[in-house]
Amino acid sequence: MGGNEEKIREVAGRLLRDGEVNLIIGHERGTLPLRSSPCFVTDPEDLDRLIWDPTCDINLAKYLHGRDERVGILAKGCDARSIVVCASEGQVEMDRVVILGLPCHGVINRKNIESEIAGREILEAIVTDEIITLKGEGFEEVLPTETFLDDSCMSCRHRTPPVYDVLIGEPLPEASEDDGYAEVNELESKSAEERWDHFVDEISNCIRCYSCRDVCPMCYCKECFVDETMPAWFGKTNEITDTMIYHVVRAIHLTGRCVDCGACSRACPMHINLRALTKKAEKIARDRFNFEAGISLEDTPVLGTFKQDDSEEFII
Amino acid sequence: MKHMTIAKDGIRDFIDRLVKRCRVIAPVESGKILRFREVSSGEEACFDFHNTKLSPKEILFPQNEVLFKYSKGRGAIEAEAGPSKNGEWVIFGIRPCDARGITLTDLFFSSGEHKDLLYLEKRGRSALVGFACIHPLNTCFCTSTGGNPFGREGMDLLLVDLGERYLVEVLTERGERLIEADRGLKDASEVDVDTANKLSRVAEKSLRTRLQMEGLSEKLDGMFEDPLWDRVHQKCVGCGVCTFVCPTCWCFDVVDEETADSSSRIRLWDTCQFPLFTLQGSGFNPRPTGKERMRQRVMHKLNYFFREHRAFACVGCGRCVRECPVNLDIREIIRTIMSE
């Protein structure tokens, strides 16, 4: 990943100067250690703000919604797949988007790093594809980046974006040995009661801030079902039934659309593992319909398509 | 001011004694999160922390609160009050920024013609017992907004970590009553007080973020239509994290939750960052995009509230800075405004 920043700036600069795009959406250095932040560049003078390293954990596809200018967007495999899903759903016009594809070794999970550091404050972090160097008052620690990648990256099957206009860097091998379903499989092996208890425990801290929804590129509804008031489909309190309906319905809405980028889990301030639900939805799309979201612009949304031989044994 | 000390290993016993007399609320581990919850013994409380994930506002102004219940009988509606609270409460382990946040919350809920009885009733029965901040975080900026790592505003007792023991500053009569005749406390020596004063100076000096905020409110007076708002909101995804973790965001919504046989009127946290916040019955929304919503948050905290109360509705706790999923940092927004 590292070493490609110059190339990114060069390609982005050419697109801006040639008038091919009016805006570049990328990542810039965050204000805190281990953080990056979305960056919007319209002036080639600002191109040196663009960075690319394992702290770039935000799914930038979110920022394509509602734009009418021509946009060049930096896209990891999961960002690119999100753009493809949004395009297939008529939300993004591909002729106004230039995808600058970034082969990606994975992004870090800062919560896991902070928990490893256990209560000590990280004041400085240098993150490369290989190591994470952390400095604070009276300590310096070096961690292997690989161990602290986000869970979603550990089982990533599309480290090279399947769809792009310009690829920046060399393509990476696609196969991941880990299918990423260990947690889902374990939950599936439990009884309904045990699963209920597990999820009650998991989401009991939810404060309904909707950061999981709001960082998700697939959550673009003009009015989310949680905000509807006539009728109000369910309550707005933190009672477990209200919270559970939100999370379960959101996961159902993402079935066949979620690209498992993990942005929801990384965004959650309350450390809720939202991926346990969306990963199950992703698995259903794969098992029942042999479908993986966001692979090709030719694909039609799996739940928006009917085929005579569609699997239907799960229909009650 | 009266000064006492309490041994560190005696603090849990002190809470045990408090629990017998009143309801004690302290930071506890809830899942992977530290937040204020009622404890039944000192053993449950956590004292080794920078600050809690959510501010103690969730105790005095809970995220959901039943105002009253009602049922529709034959033609008549019968109503009953929400659950009543009683006894004395102690919010234990609060940080100076959050205690100051509560004093600002008091202003919000009690100034003007209408008093918020629901809040004031809980506030009136609550003593605040806090820990001074020996090690402010990188994201802390309390001194910029008018606070201090050893701030006493709102506190009844302030505990200062001296290593083996805590210095206990007794700041109010209510604080005095909490420690009255408690066998765990001893008179403090002059050395203890001196040590605490030194720690206070070190803590204040150690703050890494110092913002120039003098004249900020006045500057914002003329900036409602400034093009700056087009830029600063761009990153914002419109979630409610910053406002929900904020000790000085108080906006709420009121909804009716109805079931077949009983219904409740509930008040819930709301946030100016949600589109629904100002959506009117006609379908018109005066704050239709993220730009207007971000401007509202910044203006309310740093201009409207300041004009009324001569204080920012921000205590510099840094929670919004730490928790924003896209690292939109209010300190940067303040710097940008000041540099315009």
Image (cartoon, coloured by chain):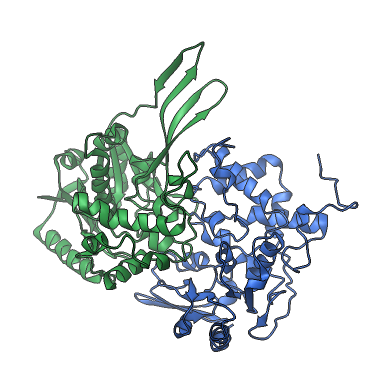
Q: Position of residue A205 (x, y in %)?
A: 50, 47
Q: Is B82 located above or below residue B283 in the figure? A: above
Of all residues, the one furthest to the right in this rendering is A309
- For the point 60% across and 52% down, which residue is it? A221
Q: Is B18 located above or below residue B103 in the figure? A: above
On the question of residue A85 being in view, the answer is yes
- For the point 74% across and 71% down, which residue is it? A177
Q: Quadrant of the N terminus of chain A?
A: bottom right
**Which quadrant of the structure image shows residue B254?**
top left
Nearer the observer, A137 or A33: A33
Give the colour of chain B: green
Nearer the observer, A93 or B114: A93
Q: Is residue B329 left or right of residue A278?
A: left
On the question of residue A154 being in view, the answer is no
Q: Position of residue B108 (x, y in %)?
A: 26, 43
Nearer the observer, B281 or B273: B281
**Which quadrant of the structure image shows residue B15?**
top left
Q: Position of residue B18 (x, y in %)?
A: 28, 38
Give the colour of chain A: blue
- For the point 47% across and 73% down, which residue is it? A34
